[in-house]
Structures are given as structure tokens and as C-alpha cells.
């Protein structure tokens, strides 16, 4: 279950040159690769490209495969790629429990089974009993933990982390990073993280620098 | 994408082009409906030769341009005063919600020589035991009509100012300007407001177009002999001799020309004012900030007139007998409410509003969702602006003929379609901003969790946009309830709603009946706005992230 990028490159709308030199990369199951690079080099665009949410107008080259299957033709919802965003992106109209249930796959049938899966996820996140809480009342760290558990409940084949720890306080950042990366490693899925933070790079298994 | 564009062009673009085309055709003598094919300029010659034509034209220009300029000038200090006030939009909502016809009738009952205002100050301050002999409502200069239009348009322009100011750091700019020695009013007028004006241009042009062609307000508040052009055209269309449709159509085309010329003159005026403003700026003169008092003063006058107008309606609707110069009726009774036939028109008004708003909302959501899915704009913004800029009388009569050709006889379906031309643009304008402001990362997040386009729409977008959708629905209901010509012409008088009944009764002998109709017409949109504010608050009472942020 690996994520493979072969000669991937992006050209922004209206631009002539590619944002970064063609990138080839293989991320093994349970491995976390950190992609670093200067502002504007296209780190977040790379994540959007892999996740399937690249805005219209970008031109792309190369291929992305997950478990040997080409992701290129698949819409975002069919790729099986979870994404952790900077602001956690919890749905503000849903409770914490409903946010987690949103990620649950349809195969988890029955109210009791779904409720149990949500409760387990919350317990793993150290947030037992938070089912009915309003996401707006959570701290940044709590939100990120819920976002990770929600992503994992969807049973993705790979996970992408887009500057997810950048807005957390320095002390908290380390704890949340460790929490996220340990859970990803335990899930045995490949993870690609883009970041500005050297500490993120140190926590990853491998580091890659994007160059123009 | 092509199919969606074709659908919107068919629903909204085609009726306007057909309406204008058939009006122009009738003006040139092409009237297949009555078997006349007398092509030529005779209709225009007849229109120009009509008694009082030049007075009508002058009156139209004076009231249209006067109301627009007056509304804009008054909105400047009021906008400055309200921009820093939390909940200012809610202060404006009641006045925005009251339909033009209802406000006009209320204002007439307030300002007439025998109106409530004269009664309140008589005889102790005026010595009047009988209504004074001068003319207020229906004055030959159109002053009361201008006042009525301003009372409706000032809140609209202030709202547009507040929306335009929203994303800007007004406090910071004000502080920077004052640090340079300019008083608050001058910073607002010379530095901040000119930045907001580009966003105000379309609302101002809509106000101009509306003021030049208003019919319902002009029937109640404007002079009747000669009236403004739009009223004169309506009278000609309603004349027993069908041949009068030709000069009526010609006059409607002339009104279109008047409006186009006024729009161009306004745009030229903008450049002149901007140039003068730059000269003023370069001089660097620091003046006195009169606007500090102006804002609250204007707010008191606008609110006072609005409350007075609605108060007069309320009192008349329950008055048993009200002799001049008594400040209040001799007695109060709900008897007339039981006797008056307001339930039928009210239900029909509500039915039309619900039907039109539901269709408009579905179409707006379809438009925005199509744009999201294809990541392309439909580029039909002109189609939204067109019905708001064109004079209704300039295409609705032609459209009624067009409907007949389509096999759509005068009646409720034709009225719904005609109303939709005005309801849809406002619903779309109200919804597009919040929809496009929705963080795309939320949708990306939902997609990464396996949610397809339909689930993203139903489970994320629509619930998150509940407040703007409710507000767009309330606006749609308010616009529908306010329609007069869009009911009168395509309904051919067979569709009796509160607006048509209230205007018809306004000139009658019994003020109480007109007050009941006008009050009900004002109540429906107010209830809609209250529900639109309350429902999302109740629905998301436990969701802090959705309170106040999405509207």
C-alpha cells in the first residue's frame, strides 16, 4: 500500500514554467515523508493535486498511483486519500461526534456500531465524552486530534498533511505532531506532509526539498 | 454548462428581450394581436403630442434623478454613523422589508393635509380646525414622491455601503485620516466613501432605474395631472381604445431612452464629482465635521417617517371614527378587519411569494452548484442586472403579449414567471456572496472523507449556509410581495394581490380599507425577515461557529 509519484510537476494558471522540478517519490506504508521548500514553490498545490482538489487552470505532468492504481482520473472522494488541513476544517454545523461520524464508512452499519466507533475514536484522541460538543468550543490541539480521528475513520489508503501544525502553540505542536504521526504509523498507511517547520522535518522518516 | 446557460437565458434573458422587442414593435405599429400592421413613427408622434407630455417628462426626470441623488447624499452621513454600529443591518431591516406601495400609502396618511402629522400638531401649534388647503401628497413638483422614494432607497444604499465597507479596515483608515488632521466627516467623505463607491455603483443605478419608472408609489404619492411617464404609460395601456397601445408603447420606448440617457449622465456626473473631489483633496483644507451630527439626525428623520407611516396605517386600520384635528381616533375596533376582504389577496400574495421564492432559490442554488462543480462562472451577471435596471413598464406589457403567444394566458402562472424576473436577481445577489465565501478547504475535507458532490451539497454546504439561504428567501418573499406591475400586467387585473388592492384602494374614500391592505402587505415581508433571522439562530443555537459569521 504505497503512494508513488512519478515525474509530477505543476504549472500554475497563466504561468509558463513549472512550480517545481519534476518530482518522483515513493512513500511506503507507515512511512511519513516531509516535503519542504520556500513559500510559493507549490507545496500545498502538490497536496491538492494528490488529494484531487487542485483548482481548475493548473496544468499537470507525471502520474500519481496509490496501491498501483492511477489516481489521475479519480474524483477526490474516490481516491481514498485523507487530508489534514491547517485549520482542521471541522464542520461547524455538526457536533464533534457527528463530525467523526461523517468520516465513517458506510460499511459500518447500525446506529450502535457507528456510535461505538465514534466513542472509540474519541477515547483514542483523549476526548471521551465530547460527542455532543460544539467544535467551536475546542482548543486548536483538540480540533486537530478530532480531525485526525475523523480522517482515519474513513480508512484512507494514504494521508496528506498540509501545514497542519503551523497554527498551534509551540508546546502543543510537539504533542499533537507526535499524536498524529504515531497514529498514522500505527495505521500502516503512507503519509506525505508539507511544512515550513524544521521540527516537522525532524519528526518525519524522510525529508524532501522541493526546488524550482 | 451549456444546458445550464441555455436554461437561464430561456427563463430570464428571453422574456426581457421578447418584452422589449414586442414593446418596440407595438411602438412602431406592429400589433398583430389587434390586426394592425401600420409600420412607422406615428406612435412616437402621438406620444409626443399627448397633452402634458413635456411636463410628464420633466417630472419623471426631476423625481427620478432627485430621489436618487437625495438618497445617495443622505446615505453618506448615515452610512458613516452606522458603519461602526453592531447590528446596524437589523436596524435597517424593517424599512427594507416594507414594500414601496405600503410605505407610500402610510406616508400619504401621515403627510396629507388631513394626515396624522397635521393632526398631531393641530390645533395647538397651527390653529387648524380643518385640514389646511395646501397640497402635500400629489404635489405638482413631485416632492412627496421624492421623499417616499428616498425613504425606501436610503436604507437600501446604506445597506450596500455597510456591505462594501465590511471587508475594509474602516477604523484604521479613519484613525489614519484623523491623525492627518481631518475631521471624521471629511475622512469619510473624501477618503473612505470614494473607495466604497465602485461597489455602490450598481445599487445606485438600480435606484435610478427604479425611481425613473416607479408606478405604485407614483400612483399614491405623485401628481396625477400630468403624472410621471410610467403612470401615464400605464393609463394609456389601460385605455378602452386598443389603438392607444401604440402611443403607450412608444412612450415606454421613450422612457427606456430617458433611462439610458440618465444612466449615461449619471456615469458622466460621477467622473465630474471625482475630478472635483481630487481638486479638493489636493488643497488639503481641513474643515468642520458636520457629518457627526448629520448621521444621527438623518437616522431620526428616516426612522421617524417610517414609524410615522406604519403608525398611521395601524391607527387607520383599527379606527372607528377619526375626526380632524384629533390626534387619535375616537374609538378602536377590529370590526373592519373581519368585514374587509383581505384574506384572499393575502393568501394569494403569500402563495405567489412562496412559489416564486422557492423556484428562485432552487435556480440560484443550481446556478452556484453548477459553477462549483465545473469551476467555471456562467457569466450571466448582466442577465441578473437587466430586469433591475430596465423600466418594468418598458417590457412587462410586451412580455404579457409574448406570454399570450406562448399559450400562457393572463393569470397566476404568468404572474409567477414575471415576478421571478425580479425575485431571482435579488435571491441570487443575496446568496452568491456567502456561497462563494465558503472555505473551499471544507469541501476538500469532505471530499477526502469520501463525500461525493451530492453529499457535500446536502450535508455540508446547505446546512452551513442555512442563515444566508433563509435571508435570501426572506428577500425573495419581500421582493415578490412588493411587485405591482408584474402582477397587474401579466395578471390582466384578474390576479388580485395585496399590492394591487392597496394601491387601488389608496385613492378611494375609505382610508381604513387601504390601511388594512397596506398593513398586511408590510407584515408579510416583516414576518419573513423575522423568521429568517430567528430560524438559523434557533437551529444553530449550540453552534458558536455559525452564529453571525455566515450572514
Image: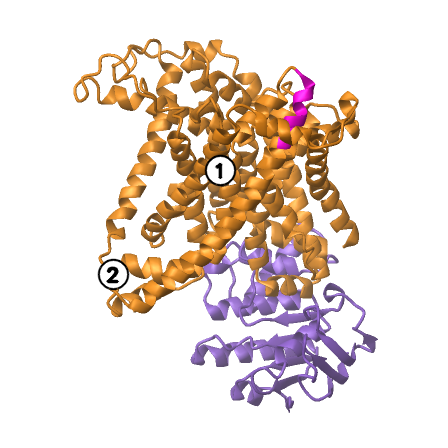
Chain colours: A purple, B orange
Whether residue B545 appears in this view of the structure is no
Quarter placement of the N terminus of chain A = bottom right
* Image x and y of residue A31, in percent: 68, 84
Who's the residue at 69% across and 71% down the image? A54
Residue toward you, B239 or A118: B239
Please state if A65 lies on the left or on the right of A20 as rendered: right
Above or below B190: residue A207: below
Total numbered badges shown on the rendered structure = 2
In the image, residue B59 lies in the stretch drawn in magenta: no
Answer with the quarter of the image where residue B311 lies. Answer: top left
Choose between B234 and B307: the one closer to the eye: B234
Asked whether the viewer can see residue B232, the reply is yes
Q: Which residue is mark 1?
A: B211
Which residue: 48% across, 16% down?
A: B505
Specify start and end residues of the magenta stretch as a single range. Answer: B241-250
Res. B346 image quadrant: top right
Residue B168: x percent and y percent? Answer: 42, 62
The majority secondary structure of the magenta stretch comes to helix
Please give the label number shown on residue B183: 2
Along the line of sight, the residue nearer the viewer: B370 or B80: B80
Residue in front for this viewpoint, B340 or B218: B218
Taking the image as shown, residue B387 lies to the left or right of residue B283, namely: right
Task: Tell me the residue at 67%/70% (across/down).
Answer: A82
Secondary element type, mark 1: helix
Dot 2 crowding, Cα within 10 Å, few <14, some 14–19, many 20+: some
Amino acid at each position: 500500500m504505497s503512494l508513488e509519484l512519478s515525474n509530477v510537476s505543476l504549472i500554475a494558471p497563466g504561468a509558463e514554467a513549472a512550480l517545481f522540478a519534476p518530482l518522483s517519490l515513493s512513500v511506503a506504508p507507515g512511512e511519513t515523508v516531509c516535503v519542504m521548500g520556500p513559500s510559493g514553490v507549490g507545496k500545498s498545490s502538490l497536496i491538492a493535486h494528490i488529494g484531487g482538489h487542485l483548482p481548475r487552470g493548473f496544468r499537470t505532468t507525471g502520474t500519481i498511483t496509490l496501491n498501483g492504481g492511477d489516481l489521475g482520473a479519480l474524483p477526490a472522494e474516490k481516491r481514498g486519500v485523507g487530508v489534514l488541513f491547517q485549520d482542521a476544517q471541522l464542520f461547524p454545523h455538526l457536533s464533534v461526534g457527528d463530525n467523526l461520524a461523517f468520516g465513517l464508512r458506510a460499511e459500518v452499519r447500525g446506529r450502535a456500531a457507528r456510535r461505538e466507533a465514534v466513542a472509540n475514536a474519541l477515547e483514542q484522541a483523549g476526548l471521551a465524552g465530547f460527542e455532543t460538543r460544539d467544535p467551536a468550543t475546542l482548543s486548536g490541539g483538540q480540533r486537530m486530534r478530532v480531525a485526525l480521528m475523523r480522517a482515519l475513520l474513513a480508512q484512507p489508503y494514504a494521508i496528506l498533511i498540509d501545514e497542519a501544525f503551523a497554527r498551534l502553540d509551540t508546546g502543543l505542536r510537539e504533542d499533537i505532531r507526535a499524536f498524529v504521526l504515531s497514529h498514522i504509523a500505527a495505521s500502516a498507511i503512507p503519509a506525505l506532509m508539507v511544512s515550513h517547520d524544521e521540527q516537522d522535518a525532524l519528526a518525519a522518516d524522510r525529508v524532501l526539498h522541493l526546488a524550482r | 454548462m451549456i444546458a445550464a446557460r441555455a436554461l437561464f437565458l430561456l427563463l430570464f434573458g428571453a422574456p426581457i428581450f421578447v418584452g422589449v422587442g414586442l414593446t418596440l414593435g407595438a411602438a412602431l405599429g406592429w400589433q398583430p394581436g389587434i390586426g394592425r400592421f401600420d409600420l412607422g413613427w406615428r406612435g412616437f408622434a402621438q406620444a409626443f403630442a399627448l397633452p402634458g407630455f413635456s411636463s410628464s417628462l420633466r417630472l419623471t426626470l426631476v423625481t427620478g434623478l432627485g430621489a436618487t441623488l437625495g438618497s445617495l447624499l443622505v446615505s453618506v452621513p448615515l452610512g458613516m454613523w452606522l458603519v461602526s454600529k453592531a447590528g446596524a443591518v437589523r436596524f435597517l431591516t424593517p424599512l427594507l422589508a416594507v414594500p414601496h406601495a405600503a410605505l407610500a400609502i402610510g406616508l400619504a396618511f401621515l403627510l396629507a393635509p388631513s394626515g396624522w402629522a397635521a393632526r398631531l400638531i393641530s390645533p395647538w401649534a397651527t390653529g387648524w380646525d380643518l385640514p389646511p388647503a395646501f397640497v402635500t401628497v400629489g404635489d405638482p413638483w413631485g416632492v412627496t414622491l421624492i421623499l417616499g422614494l428616498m425613504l425606501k432607497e436610503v436604507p437600501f444604499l446604506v445597506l450596500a455601503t455597510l456591505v462594501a465597507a465590511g471587508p475594509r479596515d474602516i477604523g484604521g483608515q479613519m484613525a489614519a485620516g484623523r491623525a492627518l488632521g481631518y475631521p471624521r466627516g471629511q475622512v469619510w467623505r473624501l477618503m473612505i466613501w470614494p473607495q466604497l463607491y465602485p461597489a455602490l455603483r450598481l445599487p445606485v443605478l438600480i435606484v435610478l432605474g427604479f425611481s425613473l419608472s416607479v408606478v405604485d408609489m407614483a400612483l399614491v404619492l405623485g401628481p396625477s395631472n400630468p403624472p410621471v411617464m410610467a403612470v401615464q404609460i400605464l393609463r394609456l395601456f389601460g385605455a378602452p381604445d386598443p389603438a392607444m397601445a401604440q402611443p403607450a408603447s412608444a412612450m415606454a420606448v421613450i422612457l427606456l431612452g430617458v433611462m439610458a440617457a440618465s444612466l449615461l449622465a449619471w456615469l458622466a456626473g460621477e467622473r465630474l464629482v471625482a475630478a472635483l473631489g481630487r481638486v479638493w483633496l489636493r488643497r488639503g483644507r481641513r474643515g468642520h465635521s458636520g457629518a457627526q451630527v448629520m448621521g444621527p439626525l438623518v437616522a431620526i428623520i428616516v426612522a421617524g417617517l417610517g414609524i410615522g407611516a406604519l403608525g398611521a396605517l395601524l391607527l387607520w386600520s383599527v379606527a372607528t371614527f377619526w375626526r380632524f384635528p384629533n390626534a387619535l381616533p375616537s374609538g378602536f375596533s377590529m370590526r373592519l378587519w373581519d368585514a374587509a376582504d383581505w384574506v384572499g389577496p393575502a393568501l394569494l400574495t403569500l402563495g405567489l411569494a412562496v412559489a416564486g421564492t422557492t423556484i428562485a432559490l432552487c435556480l440560484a442554488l443550481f446556478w452556484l452548484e453548477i459553477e462549483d462543480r465545473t469551476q467555471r462562472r456562467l457569466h450571466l451577471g448582466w442577465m441578473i442586472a437587466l430586469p433591475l435596471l430596465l423600466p418594468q413598464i418598458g417590457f412587462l406589457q410586451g412580455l404579457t403579449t409574448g406570454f399570450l403567444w406562448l399559450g400562457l394566458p393572463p393569470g397566476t402562472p404568468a404572474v409567477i414567471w414575471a415576478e421571478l424576473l425580479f425575485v431571482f436577481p435579488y435571491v441570487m445577489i443575496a446568496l452568491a456572496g456567502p456561497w462563494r465565501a465558503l472555505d473551499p478547504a471544507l469541501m476538500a475535507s469532505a471530499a477526502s472523507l469520501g463525500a461525493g458532490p451530492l453529499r457535500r451539497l446536502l450535508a455540508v454546504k446547505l446546512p452551513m449556509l442555512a442563515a444566508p439561504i433563509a435571508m435570501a428567501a426572506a428577500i425573495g418573499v419581500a421582493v415578490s410581495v412588493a411587485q405591482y406591475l408584474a402582477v397587474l400586467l401579466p395578471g390582466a387585473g384578474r390576479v388580485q394581490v395585496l399590492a394591487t388592492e392597496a394601491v387601488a384602494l389608496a385613492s378611494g374614500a375609505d382610508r381604513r380599507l387601504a390601511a388594512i391592505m397596506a398593513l398586511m402587505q408590510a407584515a408579510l415581508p416583516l414576518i419573513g425577515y423575522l423568521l429568517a433571522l430567528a430560524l438559523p439562530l434557533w437551529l444553530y443555537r449550540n453552534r458558536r461557529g455559525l452564529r453571525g459569521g455566515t450572514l
